[in-house]
Image (cartoon, grey):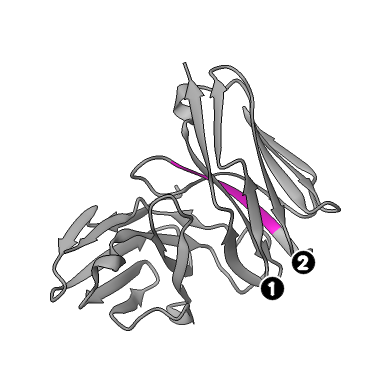
Amino acid sequence: DTEVTQTPKHLVMGMTNKKSLKCEQHMGHRAMYWYKQKAKKPPELMFVYSYEKLSINESVPSRFSPECPNSSLLNLHLHALQPEDSALYLCASSQDRASGRMGTDTQYFGPGTRLTVL
Amino acid sequence: GENVEQHPSTLSVQEGDSAVIKCTYSDSASNYFPWYKQELGKGPQLIIDIRSNVGEKKDQRIAVTLNKTAKHFSLHITETQPEDSAVYFCAATLRWNYQLIWGAGTKLIIKP
């Protein structure tokens, strides 16, 4: 099973709201990722967690705050977003990202959360 | 840094014909090349991948070829079907950095 689940599927929020996106995987993967995808573009990496520690933050504005409560869960907390933050937010996981063992870096994506900021 | 170029941006083929999408990469240290299919409103789905120690890999109607000398890799879909219609992304990762560098995507349209 290579399933990554994300909730909610759709989210509409105002610029003053606080909301959270959730991601879950039960594949035993120890690396988890948040991506942002605008229409007709490839995904852009936002954050990477490796063994529940934040290992990469691609200069993302502080209005996006990631959290990894345990090895199966990944959250993205949203606060004071702008309309240009409207996009598809994708979560992905891979078995590992630091060991260098072949095959452990393959990333599996969830279905995404379609976010609209009014 | 690594750069991946993908062509064409749109490909329209008759159902039953073959489709080929090509990508080139810039860094010879890249060693992993996945292909993702993304249907409208869904997340990218891994359909096939290849590593730098292999020249070709097949999975039913899908195949990927890698030419390390020329630094390009291609996706081949044979006997195309309507459900193959989607956007396809190629990507590459460097040996020491597991971040995916993405191509711009190809919209594949299968004409009935």
Measure the C-alpha gap from mark 1 to mark 2: 9 Å
Q: Which mark is residue B29?
A: 2
Question: What residue appears at the point 69 percent right and 35 percent down from the top-left corner?
Answer: B58
In the rendered image of this protein, does residue A105 appear above or below residue A82?
above
Looking at this view, name the residue that lies furthest to the right.
Answer: B69
**Residue type pointed to by label 1:** Trp
Q: Badge 2, how many Cα within 10 Å: few under 14, some, many 20+?
A: some
Is B74 part of what is drawn in magenta?
no
Q: Earlier in the sequence, mark 1 or mark 2?
A: 2
* Front residue (pair A94, A14): A14
Residue B72 placement, left or right of B80: right
Q: Is residue B34 magenta?
A: yes
Residue A77: percent from left, percent from top: 26, 75
* Residue B71 horizontal/vertical position (percent): 78, 54
Q: Is residue B94 left or right of residue A95?
A: right
Span of residues in magenta: B32-38
Instruction: Kindly indicate the quadrant of the structure image that contains residue A60.
Output: bottom left
Residue A19, picture quadrant: bottom left
Q: Please state the horizontal and vertical placement of residue B90, each as a whole percent of the image.
A: 60, 50
Q: What is the number of the mark on residue B96? A: 1
